[in-house]
Image (cartoon, helix red, strand yellow):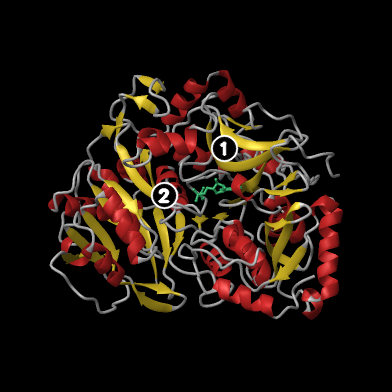
């Protein structure tokens, strides 16, 4: 299976996967997306997107679908006017669905709240009136730093309603991270809470805001929602939500804004560098968020109960909790807390309680569920689930199979969705009623999207070849720049393949023999072993395909003979047995990788660890593992979700038993 010499390939193709799962006839027949969608988009891309934009209510229709004359700055639905919040809330009330539940909110301590579209309209209107009373209007920036409570969603929609840009900052970020994001966007208002529930206990949140605001002179007011009843210090900028918002009128007339009116800024830090303020606008963004949510998740507004487990601090929460789902008149679950509070069955308890039918989560969580063991979901009735989604990282084939068997009852299609903060909405994913799914592959660009895998010269690689994933056509929900930094926007995304005009944002990928796309991780992480360019993802997937392994991270560490040697860090599955970390077991694991993808990929060293270093959004930070593998002092750990993890890993290494 090993390919002959890797030289010349941008990335070698090592792992093969032959399992495929066609949709059932029953699913295919009822699916929102039918095969003709691909044909339609191919026949006339702009006409296709114009048709998708008709999903929305436009106050004024556009006169041009796409203006790409100022590339790489796109304008979509030029001349059109709409109000994004009206599209997500009011029009559903007007069409007679005011009594439909929009949000089944589940608090971490077990409190809950069902919010209908009529109620959502009143809450968003009050919040919009409150913002107006503070002088907030079109193009002002509002920072939102909150846990997953309904007021966070009301706040985002209220901003959209008055034309202000929200800048949501994940509630797990530090005061300093908040301050830099407030300052860079020059936010005039911050919306926050007194505290938030974290693993069963209230933790203060407002002190971080106080600290951040002290160093951010643009802030005039801080609106504070009472969530935990934690005592808080008070400044003259502070105002309680229940005093300011609850006294407002629940009537508000939305104003229509230009299709290219800015909607939000969202900072993405990645694993290195100063955070970038990714800018999204209105008409194109909402069109693609709505279209993808409807077709990729096969949403049926009258019968489905949808649940996306992301936090609104990430783009997934923006596009697949707020804008896509609400524009489609979803009924959805929003959960405030962690998946193991009060126990490791919490998600399945919620699925059972609300009859969730569509569930969208991240591979890091799926692998955590694997580590906790299949007996936990087995205790719950998950039979309502009919579509499962994955996003954020490559999903290893074995984790995919585990998800299908243990959560999806062996029948629910899994959509592996590739996209980025920058792309705004899903770009590559199977359509669940059309495409036979393949464990581990995001497969093909959605109808209307252009993506391909190219070599160093920008030439498309043949089937079976690996290289760089590029986007070769502008798309409606694409970023419109980096806030305040045009140069960085051009450099970061448009310079690598500037000649060809391709967008490139750092992911390696390959085509399999059927032409399906596999994401192979960040190109910065690619390992070079004796001239073979090996992706971290493929070796990790080979490790996870062993029955004892729940999660794996591999890095290339410098090696005198081979250039780089592969060093693997693995977490064992629940019930893997006491011997699973012993010398014989480690040897068996190395042999397993050699057998799965070839001797060239056999790890030089495997270490069993209790945890892996991850960013707050769940991505593995291989840079830190490289430091460990090369015996260096571990670098900057400030972007880690839990900085004590590196101590745990180093302590494990000193025990000496984990090395082969
Ligand atoms: C990066 C973007 C998109 C919402 C969450 C992350 C990786 C994302 C997949 C997938 C393989 C994936 C890529 C991408 N990624 N989805 N299905 N398969 N890799 O947003 O934080 O902007 O990260 O996440 O590396 O570039 P983000």
Can you tell which quarter of the image residue 583 is in? Answer: bottom right
Q: Is residue 47 left or right of residue 593?
A: left
Question: Who is closer to the viewer here, 418 or 485?
Answer: 485
- Residue at 81% x, 44% y is 18
Q: Earlier in the sequence, mark 1 or mark 2?
A: 1
Can you tell which quarter of the image residue 574 is in? Answer: bottom right
Q: CA distance from mark 1 to mark 2?
A: 23 Å
Question: Who is closer to the viewer here, 363 or 535?
Answer: 535
Question: Who is closer to the viewer here, 602 or 115?
Answer: 602
* Residue at which label 2 appears: 318
Count of numbered marks: 2
Q: Is residue 534 left or right of residue 508?
A: right
Q: Is 233 placed above or below 319 here?
A: below
- Residue at 67% x, 72% y is 609
Asked whether mark 1 lies closer than 8 Å to ligand 1, one says no
Q: Position of residue 220 (x, y in %)?
A: 16, 57
Q: Is residue 119 visible?
A: no
Q: Is 65 placed above or below 611 here?
A: above
* Residue at which label 1 appears: 32
Q: Position of residue 31 (x, y in %)?
A: 60, 39
- The secondary element bearing badge 2 is classed as helix
- Residue at 82% x, 62% y is 590
Mark 2 surroundings within 10 Å by alpha-carbon count, few (fewer than 14), some (14 through 19), many (20 or more): many
Q: Which quadrant is home to the C terminus?
A: bottom right
Question: Who is closer to the viewer here, 6 or 268?
Answer: 6
Q: Is residue 443 left or right of residue 619?
A: right
Can you tell which quarter of the image residue 162 is in? Answer: top left
Q: Is 134 placed above or below 139 here?
A: below
Q: Which quadrant is home to the N terminus?
A: top right
The label on residue 565 is: none
Q: Looking at the image, do the residues carrying marks 1 and 2 touch, with CB atoms under 8 Å apart?
A: no
Q: Nearer the viewer, mark 1 or mark 2?
A: 2
């Amino acid at each position: 299976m090993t390919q002959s010499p890797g030289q010349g390939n941008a990335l070698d193709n090592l792992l093969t996967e032959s399992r495929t799962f066609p949709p059932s006839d029953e699913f295919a027949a009822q699916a929102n997306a039918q095969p003709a969608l691909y044909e339609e988009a191919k026949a006339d891309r702009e006409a296709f997107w114009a048709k998708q934009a008709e999903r929305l209510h436009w106050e004024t229709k556009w006169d041009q679908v796409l203006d790409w004359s100022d590339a790489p700055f796109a304008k979509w639905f030029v001349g059109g006017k709409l109000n994004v919040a009206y599209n997500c809330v009011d029009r559903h009330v007007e069409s007679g669905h005011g009594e439909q539940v929009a949000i089944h909110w589940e608090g971490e301590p077990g409190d809950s709240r069902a919010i209908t579209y009529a109620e959502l309209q009143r809450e968003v209107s009050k919040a919009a009136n409150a913002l107006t009373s503070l002088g907030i209007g079109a193009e002002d920036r509002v920072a939102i730093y909150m846990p997953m409570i309904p007021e966070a969603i009301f706040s985002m929609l209220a901003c959209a309603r008055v034309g202000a840009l929200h800048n949501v900052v994940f509630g797990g970020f530090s005061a300093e991270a908040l301050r830099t994001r407030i300052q860079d966007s020059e936010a005039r208002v911050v919306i926050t809470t007194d505290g938030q529930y974290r693993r069963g206990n209230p933790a203060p949140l407002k002190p971080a805001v106080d600290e951040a605001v002290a160093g951010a002179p643009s802030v005039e007011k801080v609106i504070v929602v009472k969530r935990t009843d934690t005592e808080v210090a008070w400044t003259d900028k502070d105002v309680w939500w229940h005093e300011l918002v609850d006294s407002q009128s629940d009537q508000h007339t939305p104003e229509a804004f230009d299709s290219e009116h800015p909607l939000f800024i969202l900072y993405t830090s990645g694993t290195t560098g100063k955070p970038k303020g990714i800018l999204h606008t209105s008409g194109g963004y909402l069109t693609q968020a709505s279209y993808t949510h409807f077709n990729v998740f096969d949403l049926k507004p009258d019968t489905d109960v949808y649940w996306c487990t992301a936090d609104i601090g990430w783009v997934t929460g923006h596009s697949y909790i707020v804008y896509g789902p609400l524009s489609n008149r979803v009924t959805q679950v929003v959960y405030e807390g962690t998946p193991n509070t009060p126990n490791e069955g919490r998600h399945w308890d919620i699925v059972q309680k609300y009859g969730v039918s569509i569930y969208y989560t991240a591979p890091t969580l799926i692998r955590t569920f694997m580590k906790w063991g299949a007996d936990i979901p087995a205790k719950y009735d998950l039979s309502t689930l009919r579509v499962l989604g994955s996003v954020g990282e490559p999903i290893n084939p074995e984790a995919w199979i585990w998800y299908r068997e243990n959560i999806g009852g062996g029948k629910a299609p899994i959509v592996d969705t590739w996209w980025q903060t920058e792309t705004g909405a899903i770009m590559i994913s199977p359509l669940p009623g059309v495409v036979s799914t393949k464990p581990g592959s995001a497969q093909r660009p959605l109808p209307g999207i252009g993506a391909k895998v190219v070599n160093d010269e920008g030439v498309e690689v043949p089937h079976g070849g690996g290289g760089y994933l590029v986007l070769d056509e502008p798309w409606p929900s694409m970023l419109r720049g980096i806030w305040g930094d045009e140069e960085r926007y051009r450099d970061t995304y448009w310079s690598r393949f500037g000649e060809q005009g391709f967008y490139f944002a750092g992911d390696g990928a390959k085509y399999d023999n059927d032409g399906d796309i596999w994401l192979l991780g960040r190109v910065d992480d690619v390992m070079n072993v004796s001239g073979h360019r090996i992706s971290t993802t493929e070796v990790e997937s080979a490790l996870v395909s062993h029955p004892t392994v729940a999660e794996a991270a591999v890095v290339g560490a410098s090696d005198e003979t081979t250039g780089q040697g592969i060093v693997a860090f693995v977490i064992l599955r629940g019930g893997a047995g006491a011997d699973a970390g012993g010398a014989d077991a480690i040897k068996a694991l190395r042999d397993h990788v050699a057998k799965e993808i070839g001797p060239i990929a056999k790890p030089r060293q495997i270490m069993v660890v209790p945890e892996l270093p991850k960013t707050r959004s769940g991505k593995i930070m291989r840079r830190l593992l490289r430091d460990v593998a090369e015996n260096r002092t571990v670098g900057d750990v400030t972007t880690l979700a839990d900085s004590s993890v590196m101590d745990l890993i180093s302590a494990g290494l000193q025990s000496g038993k984990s090395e082969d």
